[in-house]
Image: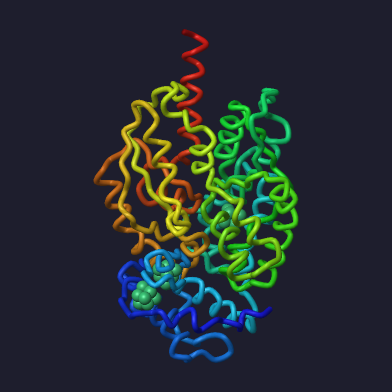
Amino acid sequence: MNLKAINVAEFDACQKCTLCESFCPVLRVETAFPGPKLAGANSARLGVMKDGHTGLKGIDYCSDCRTCNVVCPSGIKPATLIMRQRWQMKEKSRPTLRDLVLSRPDLIGALASRWPAAVNFSLKQKLIKKATARFASIAPARNLPAYARVNFRRWYATNRYRTGIKTGRVVYFHGCYTNYNRPETGRDLVLLLEGNGIKVEVPKQNCCGLPKSLNGNMRSSRDLAAANLQHLLPYVEEGVPIIFTCPSCASMIKYYYPEVYRLPGAEKVAAASFDACEYILAVMPGLSSNGSLGPVLLKIAYHTPCHLRSQGIGTPALELLAAIPGLDIHALGNNCCGMSGTYGYKAEKYGLSLKIGAPLFREIKDYRPDMVATDCGSCMMQIEERTDYPVIHPVELVYRAWKVAGERQTTG
Ligand code: SF4
Ligand code: SF4
Ligand code: SF4
């Protein structure tokens, strides 16, 4: 794999303004982390890399939140460079048992959803938690995710609106979390779109490969990426857009497939990929003004996931939620939740993950909402666990409001 070909000239533009350092949520709490300026732009620029990496100790603390990519005024992408270096460093070592387990949410999900009740019961048992801590270095205090009784793909295969009115067609990339842990997000998206005449296709798809790439199994992550492109490209060539409810899957496919894996067809697929709320706003512009949304009387705090912010598309969910009558919506500050996918599960990073998320948890508790809304599954788990507030995906709230309006029309 030709990841050694890092274009050092890309990083010549670094003006050492340290903005990336000021915004890095890990550097704020972990002094052993060299940070995005040193491990990213400066290492490349000053040519201190050997075999494609700096060998800097502590580089693995980077949570890949990609905030540094967004804030750099010179357009440098320190997170992307750090990611490439980590891969170079890990290429020669074998992944640990823990990293192998964490990098397969698709496989674990498929197995767990065969016996969800038994698995969910076991995951709460102290003995099982102790065993996962001892043999797999998973933080014993961390709640493990619960598995749905009926996964999203099974639901999709049997329960859909078929309105007959087709005003559009879209492909949905659901990702592992929606499929195995929170199928209601995918279900509500399909019901909302198909109820408005947009046909939702759910083709064969693999995990996006992000957990593998973050846990040192990049070759296999790249294979998943290549297979996903094969599944998605035929639709894109027919002009069908791809939508995501998980910002991490979206940013993996939009940025890492073309920028890091540099796979054929990746640019085309990236250009046709959209966040689900961004898509809803674009294809249903009248949603807020034509009485399509009924009242939902809740006080909601909205958290923007880092992987959504790093896409540079603003906050489409917030715009949609603001259109729901009666919804009291408050945008939380730009604080990372600290979970970062599999990062917060690791015994050695658990404490750090809580320290990173502490300002966000405080802000939520001070605001005292009825619920928190956020787009990312791992943010959902971390916020629910650390604040005890229920967490919901924005698409689920929009569907709820649309259903209320529909019920009012039929009874009125
Ligand atoms: S990706 Fe996030 S954690 Fe990593 S260096 Fe950039 S800002 Fe820091
Ligand atoms: S924000 Fe960009 S220009 Fe400023 S120090 Fe970081 S990499 Fe260099
Ligand atoms: S980013 Fe999406 S597809 Fe990738 S592991 Fe997470 S949920 Fe699965």
In the image, 287 versus 308, the foreground residue is 287
- Quarter holding ligand 2: bottom left
What residue is at 41 percent from the left and 50 percent from the top? 314
Where residue 178 sits: x, y (%)? 58, 45
What residue is at 47 percent from the left and 21 percent from the top? 404
Find the residue positioned furthest to the left. 366
Find the residue positioned furthest to the top. 412
Query: How many discs mark residues in the rendered view?
Result: 0
Judging from the image, the colouring scheme is: rainbow
What residue is at 46 percent from the left and 39 percent from the top? 394
Where residue 281 sits: x, y (%)? 48, 38
Answer with the quarter of the image where residue 97 lies.
bottom right
Where residue 110 sits: x, y (%)? 69, 50
Q: Is residue 242 left or right of residue 411?
A: right
Q: Would residue 65 be visible to someone looking at this image?
A: yes
Where residue 406 sits: x, y (%)? 51, 18
Q: Would residue 58 be visible to someone looking at this image?
A: no
The quarter of the picture where the N terminus appears is: bottom right
Up-down relation of residue 389 to residue 309 (above or below): above
What residue is at 33 percent from the left and 78 percent from the top? 31
In the image, 165 versus 136, the foreground residue is 165
Q: Is residue 87 left or right of residue 291?
A: right
Q: Is residue 255 left or right of residue 299?
A: right
